[in-house]
Amino acid sequence: MFTLYSLKNGLTNVRGIYCDGVNCGLRPDPEQGDLAFIRSEFPARIAARYTSNRFQAAPLRHALRYGKSFEGNFILANAKNANAMTGEAGIRDIETILSHLPANLEIRNPVMSSTGVIGYRLPVEKILRGLNKLDWHARDSDAAARAIMTTDSFKKELCFEVELADGSTFRIAAVAKGAGMINPAMATMLCFIVTDAAVPAEEMEGLLEEAVNGSFNRISVDGDTSTNDTVYLMANGASGAYDAAAFAEALNKITFELAMMILKDGEGANKVVAFEVTGAASDKEAQIAATALSNSLLVKTALFGEDPNWGRIASTIGASGVECDEERLVIHYDDLLIYDAQHRELDPEREEQAYRIMKQDSFRIRCDLGIAEGSFTAYGCDLSYEYVKINAEYRT
Amino acid sequence: MFTLYSLKNGLTNVRGIYCDGVNCGLRPDPEQGDLAFIRSEFPARIAARYTSNRFQAAPLRHALRYGKSFEGNFILANAKNANAMTGEAGIRDIETILSHLPANLEIRNPVMSSTGVIGYRLPVEKILRGLNKLDWHARDSDAAARAIMTTDSFKKELCFEVELADGSTFRIAAVAKGAGMINPAMATMLCFIVTDAAVPAEEMEGLLEEAVNGSFNRISVDGDTSTNDTVYLMANGASGAYDAAAFAEALNKITFELAMMILKDGEGANKVVAFEVTGAASDKEAQIAATALSNSLLVKTALFGEDPNWGRIASTIGASGVECDEERLVIHYDDLLIYDAQHRELDPEREEQAYRIMKQDSFRIRCDLGIAEGSFTAYGCDLSYEYVKINAEYRT
C-alpha cells in the first residue's frame, strides 16, 4: 500500500538536488537558457539508457566509459549543439569542460548531455564562460527544464511524492525535452530523473529499462531516432525510504506521463493517438503492427484531416508484414466499431460518430487481428503542415 | 548489338494491341476516364508482380488463381475504387464484371486491376454500363493511360522500339499510375506493359522480377505499401523478333523510367533524389540504409527546405542499424564532399555549393560507409506541405 501525490516545482522537491539554467550564448536570445546542471549534494548513483542509433553522440560515448549504471552525482546539459559526429575531439571537448567544474562540490563521474544540430564542435569557450554564470547552489528547476528545450513549445517537468504504508516518503522528479525525431528505441529526447528514494544500486538499471520500455520506447513523432537520446535516473537515497513496487510504479508513471507530454508537443502535432493492437500472432508482431501504424505517413495525415479512412489503418497493418486476415480483423476507434468482416463500409451514422471521435485531442485506434493473443500499444500523433515547416527550416 | 528508339503514342505501337478508356461514373467529371482496357488480339502470355501487403485486394486474389505467369490477353482497369478489404464478395464482383466481356473477342483468362479508396464494393452496374461504352477496337493509349490516374498530375506512358542486328524489330510499351503510397516492395501503383517481342514463356516471370527489383522496388514516396500494387507484362510475340539481352534491357529501361516518372509525380514532391549507398557490410545492409534515407521524414523535409544538413543523413544511417563508423563514413552530394572525418563542418564555400546542388530538380546523395563492398541505390523525393494537404483531404 502506498499513495502517490503530484507536487509542483519539479526537481528541487527531491532532497539534496540543486539545479540551474543560464544562457551562455548558444541561443541568440540572452533571455533563453541553453546550459543547465543537475547535481546531488549527496553521493548518488546514475543509471542510463541511450539511443539505439549506431552513431552515438560524443556525450554518450563519454558517459559510457562509466558503464550503464555508475556512482555519479552531476549532469551538465546544453541545447542547440548535439556534439554528434564530432569524433574523438568531441569527447575531449567534454573532458575539457567537465575539468572546469568547481572542486569543492565533491562531484563524482560528471556526465554531459547535449541536444541540437549534428556535426559541429561544441563552443568550449562559451560553455566555460557559462559555467561561471551557473549558481551551483540554486534550486531553479524551471530554469533547468527550459534550458534543454529545442523545438519544444512547453517545458516538461513533473514531480511525485510517494507515501509508504509506514508513513515514510520519497520523491521522484524529472525534466525532459522532446518534440521531433521521436521514435521507439527512444527519440531526440533527453530526460533527467532524480529521486531521493533509497533505490538498491543493483536494481537501478532494470527499473530504468522497464520504465523506458513502457514509455519512451512506445512513442513516435516521425520515426527517426536521434544520435543523442538519453535518459538518466539519479538516486541519492536521501529520504531513506524505499519500496520496490511503489518506486517502480512512480518511475513508470513519471516516464509515461513525460512520454505523453513529448508526443503532445510533437512538432506540429495536434492530437495524440494510442494504437492498441491485440490478437496478434505474438507480442512482437503486435509491436510491429502498432509501430507501423504510429509511423505511417498516410495514417498520420488522415489523423490530421480527421478522416475516418480505416482503409489506411488496414493497409498499414497488411504492409507491416504481420500475420493477418481481413475476415478476422476488427477495428474500433475508441468504442465505435469501424470495421469487421460484417461491417466493411461505414454507414453515415457510424461515419458521423467516427468524425466526432477523431476531433478529440486524444483517442484510441484499436485493432484486433483475431489471430492469437499478442498485444502491444504504441502512441503516435498526426502530421500537419507545421511539421513540414518546422523541419524544412530547422537549421536555417 | 541492338538499337533502342523512343516512340510516341504508347501502347498501340505494339502489334495486336487495342485499348481504350471511358468515364463510367466513378469519377464525377464525365470528361475524366475511370475505366480502361488493354487487350491483345493474338494469344498472349501475362507475367505478374503483386504487392507485398498481406491484405491483397480482390483483383489480385482473383488473378492469382491463374498463377504468376499465365496465358492471358485482357486487362480491365478502374480508378477511384480499390476493391480492397471487400472479402469474397469483391472477387465475385470481378467475376460478374468479366463474365460480361464480349464473347467474340477470344478473351483468355481476363484480369482486372483497381486503384482508389479501400473498403467499398465496386459499383458493378456502373462498370457494366461502362463496358458498353468502351470501343473494343479502339487504339487509344492516351485514354487508357488517363483512366487509371488517381492523384497523378501527369499521365505515365512510354514506348520503345528495339532494332536487332538482323534488322528485325520488336516494341515494348507501358502505362503506369503512381503518386502516393509508394514504397519499395512496390507502391500504390499499377503498371501495364505490353510487347510484341517473342518472349519465351518460361522467361517472362524472371525478366519481370528483375525489372521490378531494379525500378519499382527502389522508389519511395511515403514508405507506405498499398493493397493493390500490380505490374503486368503481356507478350504476344506478334513481331516474331526476340533477343534476350536486348529485351531485358528494354524492359529494365521502361520500368526504371516509369518508376522515375512516378517518383517525380510523388504527391507534393518537387525533387527526385538518388540515395547511393556503397561500402556497406553487404548489399542487404546497403539496401537497409538507402531505403531508410529515402523514407526518413527528417531527410525528406530537409530536401524540401534545401538545407544541406548532412547530420540528418548520418543520423538516419546510424538509426537504420547497419554497421557504420563516423571515422569511415564519407558523404557526397553529387560530386561535392559534404562529410568525412577530416571535413566535419561545412565551410561557407562548400555550403554554398551544396545549396546550389540541392536546388536542382534531381541530384544524388552518395554515402560510402567504408566497411566493405555492399551497395544499393534507392530513389526518393522531398516532403512538402502539399503532400500533407493531398493526404489529409484525399477521401473527402
Image (cartoon, coloured by chain):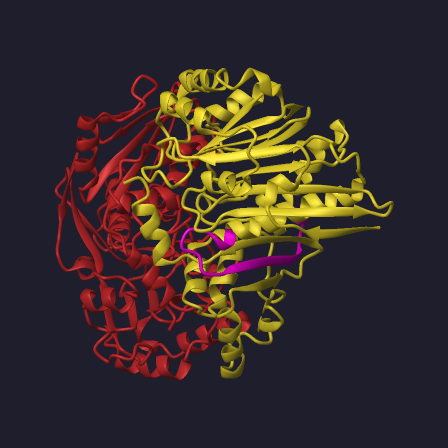
Chain colours: A yellow, B red
Q: Nearer the viewer, residue B48 or A372?
A: A372
Q: Nearer the viewer, residue B348 or B391?
A: B348
Q: Which portion, as a residue range, is magenta? A: A263-284
Can residue A185 be found in the magenta stretch?
Answer: no
Residue B26 placement, left or right of A50: left
Q: Is residue B213 above or below residue B143?
A: above
Question: Where does residue B107 sit, x and y in percent of width and height?
Answer: 35, 69
Question: Where does residue B65 sit, x and y in percent of width and height?
Answer: 50, 61
Q: Is residue B124 above or below residue B81?
A: below
Q: Residue at x 65, y 42 (%)?
A: A13
Question: Where does residue B75 sit, x and y in percent of width and height?
Answer: 34, 65
Write down the quadrant of residue A235 in the picture.
top right
Q: Identify the image quadrant of the C terminus of chain A.
A: top left
Q: Is residue A229 above or below residue B233?
A: above
Outermost residue on the right side: it is A166
Question: Where does residue A105 sit, x and y in percent of width and height?
Answer: 59, 21
Write down the quadrant of residue B166 in the picture.
top left
Residue A64 placement, left or right of B126: right
Can residue A269 be found in the magenta stretch?
Answer: yes
Residue B381 visible, this angle: no
Q: Is residue B269 above or below residue B317?
A: below
Residue B395 visible, this angle: yes
